[in-house]
Image (cartoon, rainbow, N blue to C red):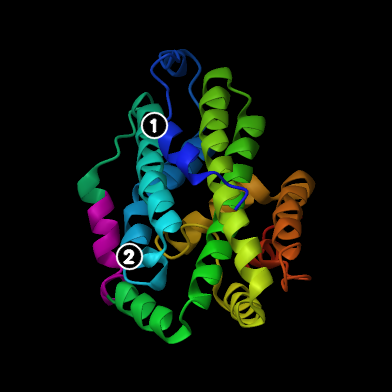
Amino acid sequence: MAFDIDKYTETSTKVAWQDLDFSDFREHPLPEGTLRSLRYMCDIEYHTVCYLRDMLVTPSHKDEDVTAFMTMWNREEFWHGEALAAVLAEHDVIVDFDELKATRLKLGWKDRLDPVKQSLLGNIVGSGFIAVHMIWGAANEWSAVAAYNRLADLEAHPVLAELLRRIAKQEARHVAFYATQARERLAKSKKAQVLARFALKNFWGPVGSGVMTDAEVKHVMGHLMGGPDGRREAAKIDAHIARMPGLDGLTIVQDALDARGIAA
């Protein structure tokens, strides 16, 4: 593997933000639309533990490198949530863990059944499931990198931009792991290619779409991926995915935008 998992686990750390002057947000507050997107991102970062939970009942948890990565990944994503929550707090938007728990509880049986479904699917599919998990993760992380960098460009607030680019830099390392694993596993198995293509085409949705309301998903997608510049970013993500073995021609991100009526 081109990705050095040992180096990654040794250098993994929480994103730093204490050196940034967050008091600047009091003098130059962020607009409502940006705060709404940041709240969405914050909530989803805190929900990462649920994705880890679901993974632990699939064949992925038996792979040593995947388990090591996912452990560090979950830790880093939690601190992304903490950093974003600190920005929101400067705007008197308090992220309450009871509210996050309530959001999860509103999913009801869907949330409770997810680990069961993942376990059954993983054991039926076998080792090919890991390839699907890896390309799915890569698609999500490419989306995250694009989202953080895009919001940094759109808002151009020096403190926010620096924080978001630091988060994006860590997300880029996540991309490197997922993409390396996906590429090699897909290249070795036509069955995995078929499964991955089917799963992405039929079931993939924007990160957070299984947790947040449709209105919030549409807001964030429109805010970050709407218009010509946003569509170009979406096309770049699709191009990354389409270069994977057996996945040429997929346009899942652009399809998700079209399905939600996000203007180009």
* Residue at 32%, 54% in the rendered image: 49
Image coords of residue 67 (percent x, y):
38, 56
Left/right of residue 186 with respect to residue 121 in the rendered view: right
Q: Quadrant of residue 195?
A: bottom right
Q: CA distance from mark 2 to mark 1?
A: 23 Å
Image coords of residue 26 (percent x, y):
42, 16
* Residue at 45%, 32% in the rendered image: 11
The disc placed on residue 51 is none
Image coords of residue 77 (percent x, y):
41, 43
Please state, as top left, top right, bottom left or bottom right, where the C terminus lies in the image: bottom right
Instruction: Identify the secondary structure beneath mark 2.
Output: loop
Q: Residues within 10 Å of mark 2 (few under 14, many from 20)?
A: some
Left/right of residue 51 with respect to residue 263 in the rendered view: left
> Which residue is farthest bottom?
124
In the image, residue 91 lies in the stretch drawn in magenta: no
Q: Which residues are magenta?
A: 100-112
Residue on which the image places disc 1: 14
Q: Quadrant of residue 148?
A: top right
- The amino acid sitting under disc 1 is Lys
Total numbered labels placed on residues in the image: 2
Residue on which the image places disc 2: 56
Q: Is residue 110 visible?
A: no
